[in-house]
Amino acid sequence: MPDALDPTQWRFSIGNLDGSARQFGVKGNGPDPRNVTVETGLIKYELTYSEYYAVNDPTRRGLGPGGVRTGDNIASRNQDQVLGVVLLQMTGTRTLQCEVFPGKSAAEVNGFTVAVKSYER
């Protein structure tokens, strides 16, 4: 989904990763999820932390005190540190396979395991 404050950046939200609901940035900010289809095949997204910053003063980062303020032109960026990988594959126009690999990089993940989950919209 696009970030709520900076829709140029993609976010991956998950209900449980190591016991916590989390939202991640996507390293390289792609591929664009709107373009993922059955024909695209297996997709790997490397998950990262993301941060907000004030465009007019990039030293002001985050949403807390000392960070971005109301009225700032806000942007976000993804960090470089990879926190895990998510594999996705559309198996039909309304069906998706998904598996998350915490602590792994894209180079360490080659395909789904028996833990893959299937979803239908």
Image (spheres, rainbow, N blue to C red):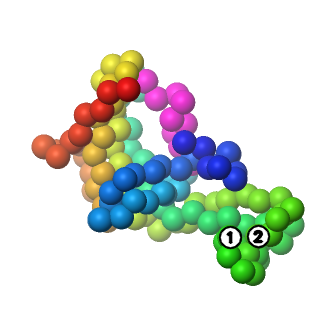
Q: Quadrant of the N terminus?
A: top right
- Position of residue 21 in the picture relative to residue 35 (left or right): left
Distance from the alpha carbon under mark 1 to that under mark 2: 6 Å
Relative image position of residue 28 (x, y in whole percent)? 55, 51
- The reply to whether the magenta stretch includes residue 61 is no
Neighbour tally class for label 2: few under 14, some 14-19, many 20 plus, Cα within 10 Å? many
Quadrant where the C terminus sits is top left
Please tell me whether mark 1 sits on a helix, a strand or a loop.
loop
Position of residue 5 relative to residue 88, above or below, is below
Q: Which residue appears at 73% of the width and 75% of the height?
A: 67
Please report the bounds of the magenta region as a residue range: 29-38
The three-letter amino acid code for the residue at tag 1 is Leu
Q: Looking at this view, is 75 or 94 the one in front?
A: 94
Q: Position of residue 86 (x, y in %)?
A: 35, 48
At x 45% / y 51%, what residue is drawn? 13
Judging by the rendered image, the residue that carries numbered circle 2 is: 68
Instruction: Residue 24 in the image: state x and y as whole percent.
Output: 49, 57
Badge 1 local density, few (<14 within 10 Å), some, or many (20+)? some
Residue 25 appears in view: yes
Instruction: State if disc 2 and disc 1 touch (CB < 8 Å).
Output: yes
Which one is earlier in the sequence, the residue at label 1 or at label 2?
1
Residue identified by numbered label 1: 63
Name which residue type carries label 2. Answer: Val
Figure check: 76 above or below 60: above
